[in-house]
Amino acid sequence: MRRAMGVLTVLEGIGVFAFAMSGAYVATQKNMDLFGIYTLAIVTAMGGGITRDVVMGRGIPVFFTSYRSFFIILVAATLVLFLKNYYKWSFIITIMDAIGLAVFTVDTCIKAAASHYNLLSFVFMSVITAVGGGVIRDLLCSRVPVIMRREIYATASLAGALLYWAIYRFAGELISCYVCIAFIVAFRLASVYFRFNLPRIRRGAAGEEDG
């Protein structure tokens, strides 16, 4: 149990750092001031986890019980401010966002499995935790959320959660954790690199819509 708690602590720290960088970077792209940048970093990093803890009835969300997460967010957002003009920064943010997606998915998979959730609840909690912060980030930036666009994003989280559900009973917690993180990151980055997306339903002609 101690080893499991250690894994969860590390995963949450990595996820918070990765998503905080993502939120801060989007804020700089929208020309927000310092308050906006740090606010968006906090919302992106903590939104999904807070939603998870509230829905799971875990009492006060874990992000409000420790200063560690806020320190991680502060470091991540400040790093973005100093390196925002680095020519490969957008690529780095894509990687960090994929890592955040993966670790928050698997972090919640571990907690949901320990709570003996059924499959539907297990998948719902894992995905909503992984994408929740990003959805809030995009809404605050007046963007269509990533999960509503063609990009493979929530689908990668969903596939990873299902993979964890399928293998953790016989592969064990740690192996399932590492396998699923690697799978989600690879799936997300491959979709970006090779530009494969979910199909988009296109609007028909005005006459077809009316008829």
Image (spheres, grey):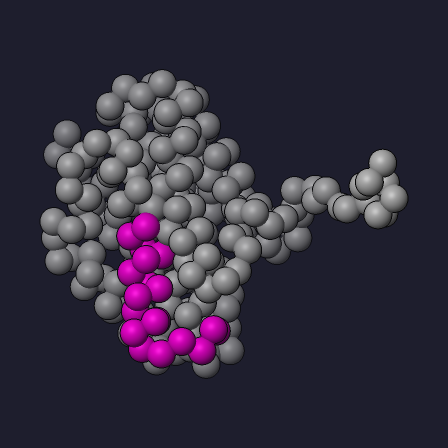
Image coordinates of residue 79 in percent, x first then y, are 32, 73
Horizontal side of 201 relative to 165 (left or right) equals right
Residue 174 appears in the figure: no
Residue at the front extreme? 210
Task: Name the residue nearer the viewer: 92 or 37.
Answer: 37
Over which residues does the magenta segment extend?
Answer: 29-47
Question: On the image, which quarter does residue 5 sit in?
Answer: top left
User: Residue at left 56%, top 47%?
Assistant: 148
Residue drawn 82% across the image and 40% down it: 210
Judged from this view, the residue extending furthest toward the right is: 207
Which of 188 and 74 lies nearest the eye of the viewer?
A: 74
Residue plotted at (63% across, 48% down): 150
Q: Quadrant of the N terminus?
A: top left
Mark yes or no: residue 120 visible.
yes
Reply yes or no: does residue 13 show up in magenta.
no
On the rendered structure, is 137 left or right of 45? right
